[in-house]
Image (cartoon, grey):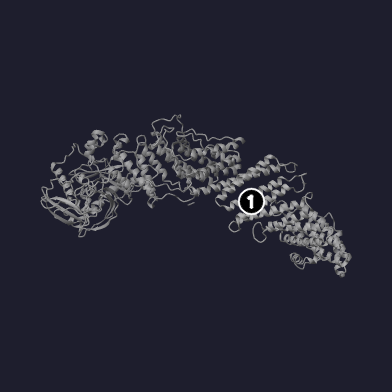
Amino acid sequence: MAQVEMRVMLVICLGNNEVKSRAVVKYSAAPPPSSYALLQEKTDLKLPPANWLRENAQLGTAGTTVLGSSRKSKPFTRYHYYFTCMYSADAFILSDLRSISKLLKIPYSKSHVSMAVHRVGSTLLLDELDIQELFMRSSQTGDWTWLKEFYQRLIDQKWQRKKKSKEQWNEKAILSKFLYYSINSDGTAVPVPSDTEQATEEGCGTAAEGPSWPFSLSLSRSQGLRNDFVRNILWTFEDIHMLVGSNMPIFGGGRYPAVSLRLRDNNKPINVLTGIDYWLDNLMCNVPELVMCFHVNGIVQKYEMIKTEDIPDLENSMFSTRVVKDIAQNILSFLKSNCTKEGHTYWLFKASGSDIVKLYDLTTLCEEAAEEKCQNPFTLPVAVLLYKVASNMMLKKRNYGTIRTLLLNCIKLLDEERHPQIIASAHYMLAELFQLDDVSEDEGNGESLRGGGSEDSYSDEEEEEEEEEEDESCSYSTSSEPQDDSKAVAVIKSVVELSVPEKYKSTHQIRPNCAFPVSQDKEEKCRLVLSYVLKGLKAVDNSIKKESDLPAADPSTPIPLKYEERSENGARDVEKEIALLLDRVGPCNEELKVTTRSGMLPGTWQHRMKLQLFLKASKAYFVLSDAAANLLKYGRALRYIKLALQCHDGYCSISGGLHPQVLLFHCQCLSLCGDVQLMLAQNASNRAAYLEEYNYQTKDDQEILHCLHRESSCQAFSMATDLASDPEYQLIVSSKCYEAAHDLLTSGVLKDLGQEQLGQVLKRLGNICNEMGVFYMNQAAAMQAERQGVRRSVCVAEQELWKKSFSCFEKGMQDFNAISDSVNTALLLCNIGRLMRICAQAHCVATSEHSRDEFSPEEALYYNKAIDYYQRALKSLGCREGHSAVWDSVNWELSTTYFTLATLLQDYAPLSRKAQEQIEREVTESMMKSLRYCDLQTESARQPLYQYRAATIHHRLASMYHSCYRNQVGDESVRKQHKALAEQHYSKAVRLFISLSEAPCELLRTLLERVAFAEFTMAGQNSSAVKLKTLTGALEIMCETRHAFKLIHKELLEQQEKASDSSSSSELNTEEVVKLTGIFEPSFSFLLLQLIKLSTAKEEQVKIYKNVYSRLLRAEKSIPLIQRVSLFMELLDQLKPPTGSDEARSSSRESNPKDSSAS
């Protein structure tokens, strides 16, 4: 069973040569270390043990590979597993334990060194390049002929494969048998997990949490994810970080928790190379001690325990650890400075017995060999490695700049015709770098697609500007080098230089070739995504052998976005047609079994990749549409959502079943389509601009459409995304889009997953029902206005519009009630109330343009229905707190309805059906209810309107009681009651009109009616004293008109000054003023004359009356209105100098109404 260990140990080698080492075991497939078997003296290792060559978890593959029985891997393939899954940006070098040891022994060894080097991000990947094995293989495949020719021409004129001697094979066999003897067990074999099992258990992602892109490519086994090492260790040697693979068996238990076993011939002393090997192996694997078993001709002699820090001081193998550290730092600097091109493969070579180390760029050499790119044997393994590293980093959601660089280099290395799968997958992953799922966005963070803020992450280093690699590269070759070095990238003239501290310093800072594009613009991001999607689709289409039956499409020819005018019949048939949407998008559990339209077979990589690319394109277009809608570009938004739904149609055409998340996204598309159609209906005046936006297409859009047409006609959603000219049709389409989304969300597949989205769709459904109800209601109102003044009954078309409107409002209330949205429910109830008032107005029978019949029962019925709906709206809201604006609106409409009902009852009394007293009671009741809903206390924009209405109500009630008092015959107590009520309402009306500075005419009329009421009262009085008292009170009321005349005079002056300014704050009705002054003057004259006749006051007061009366009679009738008003103000001032405010006097009379009604 594979396991991951995190053992950390700091090993310090003391003495004159101190170095620091730390190792972290990142992955281990070996069981916990167990104690080794101490072999008895004279044990013959030439005899095989019973368990020899049987797989054992304790030894891993070491017991068998030591004999060379494992198969050879192609370059880099044995590192794919642990490099892609254990990749760390902190590691400078990635290699195996043997290769690292061979590198660090270069100055001490005369043997040849042949390694392939490749840069992935900031990491150098080193792998042994067995040149002889490759040349043997080239005779069969022909892949390496160019390298063989290069090797023979410049390096080794005559090469032959060196065969291992019999003595070497015997030594390997004895070592293998020794390891099996040392296993402390009964000799039974323990199965080692297979490559497939290891990959499953320690892969880069589980099935449930795996990537959306194809992580496992359909490649040969040698190019798959294999882990050839028992342990993967992150080793830090001084300041150098290395990810190392090791198969060294580790034993432990008892006094020694971890030891390594070594077998040595007692007749051969330990040399420096062997000592460095032992020391480095123990350092890298965190093994503090070494157990050495000595033998002579395979016969065990003795054991010896050596501490790791003592190995450098052993006799005959002494070496300086500081020198080893300098060698490591110099080699790393040399490689970092010269292996600069990502995607290129370099060859580090030192010939046997030579002191010169050369570095060649094999990728460049291959290209210069005039062979096809696909013949480069390094191309495919390197490209697959780049792809898999990028895939693993995508899972960790970091270093997006590095991922983009890896993928672009991967694409650059490969030929599209031979490797379309990798290229298509890489383009899809490039598109995936731009996260479009948090559209909302986008737009939570802010942009729906829906808000500001970058969804991409990148390191600080990636944000820096890219430096020119050519200037930073450093070469160690000189002009005096021999001719055969001309092809070398760099040369180390002597291995002795590697031992010199800081001989080589890296001047090249490795960083990504391409920084990740940082952009806050959503459209730019989505355009990049679509460009990658298009390239991926082209790669897939080019790989499908069977040509489509469709004629070859010309990418330069735009595909027309179908547009046609919708007739009335088309608008009516839309419900039937759009219902077909659900048949197209419903979930299906059956797998697609037939060949697709393009000839693609289900289950192939092309099929899986197209599904992902279509879905990604749909999401990109969705984000573009949402962003355009936020910018009020509704024509563009409709075009993008059309493309999004066409991509979804293509997805459905090749998919046997839709994943719930895909269905949820489709619901979002339908909802956005409904939103856009609704906004188009509400902004019909800009239709020409929207049509121009709708018909525009980019080249990428056209080519993506051509790719979609290989799989589908893309007409399933054409009707829902057409730009129509009929607002009613657009509203119906919007409604049906919401209904389709609602039906999907309430289906069995999404019933538990889409609850949050369901609430939003229900709110949209309620809103579109309200919009449609208002639309039909406005049409009915317009039809009613056309027959204004014409004596005609309600037509059938008008009644049908009422029914449609009412049905829409009711359905909208059901949707809002389903999500407990009381505020919007109240608004719909308020709209139904308005509809009832329109119905009431329609039943008004006009006899002529300015007259009508008496108030009808139908009108009363609909007004009472309106009142009922307004009251239900207030009940739905509950209280004013929390939604004051809606509450105030409903409250105002309810007050208005009561007021209108009372006014119509009063002005057009149904005397043919009801008694006068009953009508008066109903008028009073409705007026008082309207007054009850007049909020005079709360400060708001409507407060002046409430004050005006309350004053008007009091004025009308006073006028009604005034009329009753005049016409009442008989019961004196009833007459007195009417008189008192008239005085009370007149007083309240005057007080409210005085508080309003914009109603002088209403104030003047009310005061004049009050004076007339006093005059009528005086006419029924017999006593001169009582008459005089009544006349005095009437004169006081007449004096209060001074305030109204002041306001009128002020507005007349403003009208003169701003005669050419149409933006005057108030428009005074001069005709009304003339009419009122015509009433004022004779009434004023009559009061003065009667007072002069009946007055018993002092001569001075009578003289004033006579003077005012005389001036009033002598006044010219033809003088301008403003001078006439000035004269009235002057006479009123002479008559009774003000001793207090008019408001105070009005209030004092209101507090004691009996004074003005005493008889």
Which corner quadrant of the image does residue 422 belong to?
top left
Using the image as rendered, state which of residue 396 and residue 501 is in the foreground: 396
Left or right side of 423 for 1104: right
Circle 1 residue: 830
Q: Position of residue 461 (x, y in %)?
A: 37, 51
Using the image as rendered, state which of residue 961 and residue 518 is in the foreground: 961
Farthest right residue in view:
1093
SS under mark 1: helix
Q: Position of residue 470 (x, y in %)?
A: 33, 45
Which corner quadrant of the image does residue 736 belong to?
top right
Neighbours of disc 1 within 10 Å: few (<14), some (14-19), many (20+) = many
For residue 237, say whether it is visible: yes
Q: Say which amino acid is labelled 1.
A: Cys
For residue 473, say whether it is visible: no
Q: Position of residue 263 (x, y in %)?
A: 15, 50
Left or right side of 703 for 279: left
